[in-house]
Image (spheres, rainbow, N blue to C red):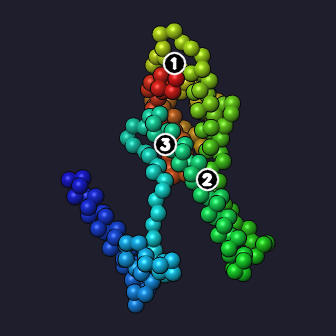
Amino acid sequence: RDSLVRFLYQELFNKLVLTLNHSLDPDGTAGCAISRPSSPDAVRGTVRVLDIFGFESFAVNGLDQLLINVAHERLQALFNVQVIAAEIKLMRAEGIASAEDTVDVPTAGPCLDLLTGKPSGIIPLMNSLCSKPKKGGFTEKDDLNFCELVHHNHARHERLPKVHPKDKLDSFAIHHYAGKVQYKVGDWLAKNQ
């Protein structure tokens, strides 16, 4: 069933891209195929999609998903700065925009501060707890204390939305660039050690 759905989605998506490309270039001179264009000039007048950000959000998200999503937050921030800044420079060079025109470049700053900001970001907090050796290893209680610290330290942070009270004991949510993800702690400190 899943294979059939993936196949149908892929075919529908390819058809959509081909239809859009054909409407942008009806005589076919710009290389409207899904495949790689024959020359650098062939991409003019076509739609192409590049997905380099494999953001993860599942029914249950753990430490692995958090770390993957932190990496993607950083990639998105770099993309925003590099690509958008380059486009603005090009637009000004071509006279489409002037130096007085301001463009709000989306920023991942608040989310990255919540996740990686020192000393109290979520990851530095976890690292500091793991830096203290614990006889017998970390337990579920330690993970729950970590989760409580996340809620306490960042209760008013714009990127830490409230979770349902029944989930607050072992979960927290983060509003990433791609959306809200709820993370459930469980063996996080042991895995991180």
Q: Nearer the viewer, residue 23 or 168?
A: 23
Image x and y of residue 8, in percent = 26, 64
| Disc 2 residue type (three-letter) | Ala
- Image position, residue 74 (x, y; %): 59, 48
Q: Identify residue for label 3.
A: 68
Give me the C-alpha separation between circle 2 and circle 1: 32 Å
Res 164 visible? no
Viewer-nearest residue: 184 or 112: 112
Q: Is residue 181 above or below residue 36?
A: above
Tell me where residue 87 sits by quadrant: bottom right
Disc assigned to residue 142: 1
* Nearest to viewer (mark 2 / mark 1): 2
Q: Find numbered disc 2 in the image and state the secondary structure of the residue it sits on.
A: helix
Q: Residue furthest right?
A: 100
Q: Is residue 51 visible?
A: yes
User: Of callouts 2 and 3, which one flags the residue occurring earlier in the amino acid sequence?
Assistant: 3
Q: In percent of the image, x 40 and y 90: which residue is there? A: 27
Q: Secondary structure at mark 1?
A: helix
State the residue at coordinates (28%, 58%). 6
The amino acid beneath tag 3 is Ile
Name the residue: 54% across, 38% down. 162
Label 2 vs 1, first from the N-terminus: 2
Upstream in the sequence, badge 3 or badge 1?
3
